[in-house]
Image (cartoon, coloured by chain):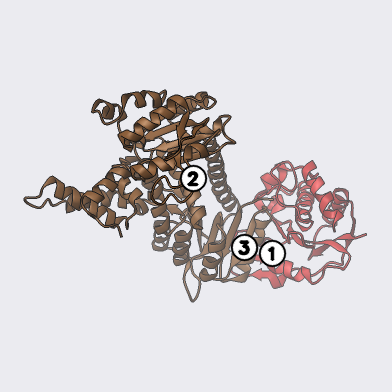
Chain colours: A red, B brown
Amino acid sequence: MKSMYIVALGGIEEDILTAIEHGLRQMYGHEVKRLPSLPGPEYAFDPQRGQYSSAHILRQLVARVPPDAVSLLAISSQDLFIPMLSFVLGQAQLGAPAAVVSVARLRQEFYGLPPNPSLTLARAVKEAVHEVGHTVGLTHCADTGCPMSLSNNVRQVDAKGTELCSNCITLVEEKTRTV
Amino acid sequence: MNHWHIMVVDDEEVMRESLAAWLREDGYNVDTAVSGGEAIVKATHLDYAIYFIDLKMPGGIDGIETMMEIRKIHPDASIIIVTAYATVDTAITAMKEGAQEYIVKPCNPEEISLLVNRIIRVKNLQRENSILRKKLTKQYSFHDILSKSPKMGKIFDLVRDVAGLRSTVLIQGESGTGKELIARAIHFSGDRAAKPFITVSCAALPETLLESELFGHEKGSFTGASSQRKGKFEMADGGTLFLDEIGDISSKLQMDLLRVLQERKFYRVGGTEEIEVDVRVIAATNLDLDRAVREGKFRDDLFYRLNVISIQIPPLRERREDVPLLARSFVERISHELGKKVNGISEGALRILMDHEWPGNVRELENTIERAIVTCKTTILSDEDVEFLITGRDQGKAAWNVPANITLEEAERDIITATVERTHGNIKEAASILGIDRSTLYDRLKKYNVQRE
């Protein structure tokens, strides 16, 4: 039986990590294991942009994927980017194990609003389910209530539910059967 | 999975691969190229829905040049020029050369998503439009004949009504209107469909040969008749005999034909045995047979015998609504036959086609499309590819210097000689250009002693 792994890149609140573990287990039915935390991804820092390159982080993660892993999801507090875009909420290999999700823009404080830990936690679970969905081969879903729908801002994240839609569940079952 | 393909062209690996990965998450098939040259090569093999092309790529060709080359291959390609350093000049150049968008990186992901969705929505509509058009073509087709003209619709109805009868049919219409196609439609819609459909071009043969061709001959009936031979009437037994260019037959043959039509019986040339056949005769002509009857050139009794069911096919200029339908259908078929990837006609080209008078009718349109496809350098026929229709007309007017003291006969001889030379001796094409039937052309060639190549 293969497992899903999560790893914190630098400091992340324990309740966020626990909620993600729980959410992934519930959604994908795999055992979810936690790897010892890694230091913050300073190697991926771009001083010009003041952000962290998600592509560089993924490259580092690929080397750390355990042999029995369906997926390895890194959780970071840093704001991520790819060169073409001003930011990304996360990035994953499509149909391959490495994925990263950032909680930076999931926090209300990012937008100058008072902190709301339970909202951050709910958003983090949805985005974790989303990125891990890519690692098992799911692409974006047209159902805006499904965590696999594309979200470019927190408004769209908040519009999603925490559970995959029936189409995506069927696809996951088909794809994980062949894993 | 999304079926659209996207191409990302950038010399910088992290830029190229991260954008490709981001688009793949959306379900697109994404291909990448490290240079303009590689992108152009890939574009010759696959038509990508969207190209993201970096403006500045060191060495080789830059983003604008890459875009221009790709547009030569796919004029409808949606190209997004990406740059890190925007200037008004480059933006203007990019848009002038046909870029769909010019974006400065880094971009808000929402903007890129909206842009890609907007382009794909248009592509989906275009694809849907093309499918619907194909369905319409099918709806407007009747036994290889395409038309949405009400006049042709009535003819199709008549064809259906008379297909099961044995009555003689006379089809009249200018050269190239598709008289034989209508004859075939009648044959293949009726209960004779499984039996032979035999065609005889009455204008192509001299009288004696035509007689033998129609009725057959016995051995030794004339010099060269070394064995008995069945004629077309016998070969068509149970089926249909299509007598094309019936207006050109001699008065003796008119009489012989009248007898067969009345009695369904005839003798082979030189034969004594009466042969009975069950043949449906469909005759066609581009002459005005009514007038030929009035002028005493065609037997009135034969005319009435042939004209039991009369079908008058309108010339293409009287059903211009069919021009786009036919043109698109010819593009599809001929590009496939010639192995060229041409899959559409520009609005400008269609306008030229719609404005043309089409003296050679559908056949001329078919030849025009073939010529345009042969010279076409992109995947869409442009107005440039068919502008020879206009320049041909204008040149014709400009070059028409009538020499002094020329007789009408001399002018006719010169026109015929020039046309036959231009068509490299192709009589069918020359007759179509001159607007006369083949038999008249043969007569004139003989009269003026014009040599075919």
Residue B252, which numbered label?
Answer: none
Residue B284 in the image, given as x and y percentages of width and height: 39, 34
Q: Secondary structure at mark 2?
A: strand
Binning the other alpha carbons within 10 Å of mark 2 as few (below 14), some (14 to 19) or many (20 upward) gives some
Q: Secondary structure at mark 3?
A: strand
On-image quarter of the C terminus of chain B? bottom left
Q: Residue at x 47, y 71 (%)?
A: B61
Cα separation between marks 3 and 1: 20 Å
Q: Which residue is mark 3?
A: B31
Binning the other alpha carbons within 10 Å of mark 1 as few (below 14), some (14 to 19) or many (20 upward) gives many
Q: Position of B2 compared to B47: left or right?
A: right
Q: Which residue is mark 2?
A: B229
Q: Which residue is mark 1?
A: A54
Q: Is residue B167 above or below residue A9?
A: above
Q: Residue at x 77, y 58 (%)?
A: A135
Q: Nearer the viewer, mark 3 or mark 2?
A: 2
Q: Chain of mark 1?
A: A
**Which amino acid, by three-letter code, is at mark 1?**
Ser
Q: Nearer the viewer, mark 3 or mark 1?
A: 3
Q: Is residue B296 above or below residue B6?
A: above
Q: Position of B111 compared to A123: left or right?
A: left
Residue B264 in the image, given as x and y percentages of width and height: 47, 28
